[in-house]
């Protein structure tokens, strides 16, 4: 009996798992800050100046839409493209709002300039690269 040939490329699973890990860590950080689950664990959300309501909403959209998009990418669903794109746009809005507010950012005890230079590009680039990857897979008709 012949075996079914998988149309999924070998790199879909590792990329989806990396996105799931990244957005899962952000979701854990969000839940930890919101519900004080582990007070001794340093977390990112507390150190960001999310004073305005729209920044909090955009941060929540980034976290949960990104996590949902990563799960959909893992399942091979093309809805992941839209979800990860929305997460990337929301993260860009959050970082733009933080930069325009001019508020100092203390990232988990790191000096603000050094820590921010490391974390800020990753916060934007990971969802953006995830979206580009998901879009590429959709155009190749891998995602359904």
Image (cartoon, helix red, strand yellow):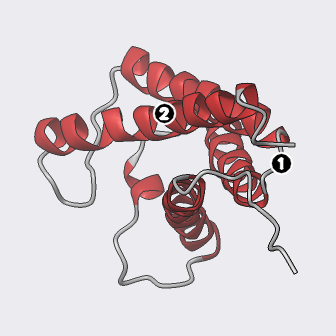
Residue 13, placed above or below residue 86:
below
Residue 30, placed above or below residue 61:
below
Residue at the (82%, 39%) spot, across then down = 78
Mark 1 to mark 2 CA distance (whole Å) = 17 Å
Front: mark 1 or 2 = 1
Residue highlighted by disc 1: 77
Viewport quadrant of the C terminus: top right
Q: Earlier in the sequence, mark 1 or mark 2?
A: 1
To which quarter of the image does residue 118 belong?
top left
Viewport quadrant of the N terminus: bottom right
Q: Are marks 1 and 2 in contact (CB under 8 Å)?
A: no
Residue highlighted by disc 2: 129
Q: Secondary structure at mark 2?
A: helix
Residue 107 drawn at (x, y percent): 27, 51
Q: How many marks?
A: 2
Q: Secondary structure at mark 1?
A: loop
User: In front: 27, or 70?
Assistant: 70
Residue 40, placed above or below residue 70:
below
| Neighbours of disc 2 within 10 Å: few (<14), some (14-19), many (20+) | some
Residue 132, placed above or below residue 87:
above
């Amino acid at each position: 009996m012949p075996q079914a040939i998988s149309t999924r490329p070998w790199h879909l699973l590792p990329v989806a798992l990396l996105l799931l890990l990244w957005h899962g860590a952000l979701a854990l950080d969000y839940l930890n800050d919101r519900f004080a689950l582990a007070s001794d664990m340093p977390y990112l959300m507390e150190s960001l100046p999310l004073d305005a309501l729209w920044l909090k909403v955009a941060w929540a959209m980034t976290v949960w839409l990104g996590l949902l998009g990563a799960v959909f990418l893992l399942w091979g669903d093309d809805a992941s493209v839209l979800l990860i794109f929305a997460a990337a746009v929301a993260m860009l809005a959050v970082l733009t709002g933080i930069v325009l507010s001019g508020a100092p950012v203390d990232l988990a005890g790191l000096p603000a300039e050094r820590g921010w230079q490391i974390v800020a590009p990753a916060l934007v680039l990971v969802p953006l690269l995830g979206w580009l990857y998901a879009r590429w897979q959709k155009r190749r008709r891998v995602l359904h």
